[in-house]
Image (cartoon, rainbow, N blue to C red):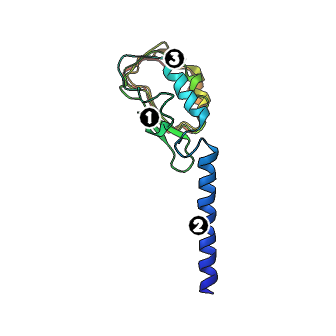
Amino acid sequence: MNTSKNRAFFFLLITIFSNSHSFISIHGGSTSFCHKIEKQSLLTMKQSLKITNHTLSSWNTTNSNCRAWNGVVCSNLTVHVHRLHLRSQSLHGKLNLSTLLDLKHLTYLDLCQNSFQGSIPSSIASLKNLEYLNLSNAGFHGKIPPTIGNLSSQRTLVLEGSLLFPLK
């Protein structure tokens, strides 16, 4: 009986290893740890902004491992981007959040202490899995979009120091 348990355990390990190897191969080879569409989404966001220093220089097409990109955190299990830590990255310009809509697993977004222009994009509500959003001192001004209330998974919202006006 002990032998059959060992065989079952061994079979389970082989199955797990085989599936994880197939997963890595399907999603860009063993040196690529990003989903192609998520990588392109991040690169498009970078291109839409003005960056006054080299903090996002690791975000490029030659570095296929976006897990190594500054401020990007991917799930070890699914390899999906689930956190963006972009605090104090000297980001400027109008933030186009539609570039991030392909980050379906994004749960954490920290954009504080940057210099964005305009108001918070109403498309923020499309980031359905967002649990944490920090836009404090990020340069946004104007009315808080009512769509921000549609973030049903959200647990934390930080808007401190922004020139935002409450909804009427």
Q: Horizontal and vertical percent for residue 145?
A: 56, 20
Residue 150: give x, y in percent of width and height: 61, 30
Give the CA distance from mark 2 to mark 3: 45 Å
**What amino acid is at disc 1?**
Trp
Q: Which mark is residue 50?
A: none
From this viewpoint, is residue 128 visible?
no
Front position among marks 3 and 1: 1
| Residue found 38% across the figure and 21% down from its top | 114
Q: CA distance from mark 1 to mark 2?
A: 31 Å
Q: Position of residue 122 (x, y in %)?
A: 58, 20
Quarter that holds the N terminus: bottom right
Residue at 41%, 26% (x, y): give it. Answer: 56
Q: What is the three-letter code of the residue carrying label 2?
A: Leu
Residue 1 shown left or right of residue 112 in the figure: right
- At 41% from the left edge and 33% from the top edge, which residue is drawn? 70
The image quadrant where one finds the C terminus is top right
For label 3, the crowd category at 10 Å Cα-Cα, with few meaning under 14, some 14 to 19 and many 20 or more, is some
Q: Residue 149 lies in what quarter of the image?
A: top right
Horizontal relation, residue 70 to residue 154: left or right? left
Q: Is residue 154 above or below residue 56?
A: below
Residue indicated by mark 1 = 69
Task: State which tag comes first along the sequence, 2 or 3.
Answer: 2
Q: Which residue is mark 3?
A: 48
> Type of residue at label 3?
Ser
| Cα–Cα gap, marks 3 and 1 | 17 Å
